[in-house]
Amino acid sequence: MSFTDADLIARVLLHEDQNAFGELVHRHQSPVRGFLIKMTKGDTHLADDLAQEAFVKAWKKLGSFRGEGKFSTWLFGIAHNEWRMNARARKEIALEELDDQPPEPEQADAAASSHLRLDLAEAMKALTPAERAAIVLCCQNGLSHDEAARALDSPLGTVKTNVLRGKEKLRRKLAP
């Protein structure tokens, strides 16, 4: 019998069941880690550290999960906040950049690999952090715009705009 996320959360809250929380981690670690890899522009070590911090915070704050949305939405929100705090601490991004200021465009190497995955990863680096987060959550992880807005703690219209702008930038970057 397979337990739902809600069942596992209840077991954790009622019995401090570490195995139930371990199952939640197992279910959600790949999408959270993938999201953070995109947000850190491919730095897998940093993404792993941030994912671990996000799950530790989720364990500590699980009692604050109200169940109004999906557990994954709440978890992506924690992961996004971990990334933002780390980026600020490392002074890699300014607060203004988080508010949709585009980064300096980088010249793509004409001889870059023709593999779509590598091209897409490179194109994703040209997006603002807000656009990248919205694209990854909505297009890669299947969250609705509303769920992504909750995870990113952003207005719904802003998330929709970031998805549209991000897709357009990706189309231009990936055009033959």
Image (cartoon, rainbow, N blue to C red):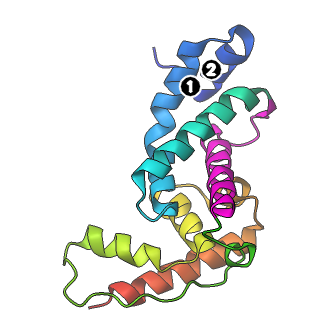
At numbered mark 2, what does the secondary structure look like: helix, strand or loop? Answer: helix
Q: Are marks 1 and 2 in contact (CB under 8 Å)?
A: yes
Q: Report whether 167 appears left or right of 164.
A: left
Q: Residue at x 74, y 35 (%)?
A: 67
Q: Residue at x 64, y 38 (%)?
A: 71
For this orientation, the residue located farthest to the top is 15
From the viewer's side, name the closer residue of 63 and 79. Answer: 79
Q: Tell me the amino acid under the disc marked 1.
A: Thr
Query: Could you say where residue 77 lies in the image, as x and y percent from the top left?
Result: 67, 50
Q: In what quadrant of the picture does the N terminus appear?
A: top left
Q: Which residue is mark 2?
A: 7
> Does the stretch in magenta take in 81?
yes
Query: Could you say where residue 40 lies in the image, as x and y percent from the top left?
Result: 50, 61
Q: Which residue is mark 1?
A: 4
Q: Report whether 34 appears left or right of 93.
A: left
Q: Residue at x 67, y 33 (%)?
A: 58
| Crowding at mark 2 (Cα within 10 Å: few <14, some 14-19, many 20+) | few
- In this picture, which residue range is highlighted in magenta? 64-90
- The rendered magenta stretch, by its main secondary structure, is classed as helix
Q: Considering only vertical position in the picture, is 167 above or below 117?
A: below
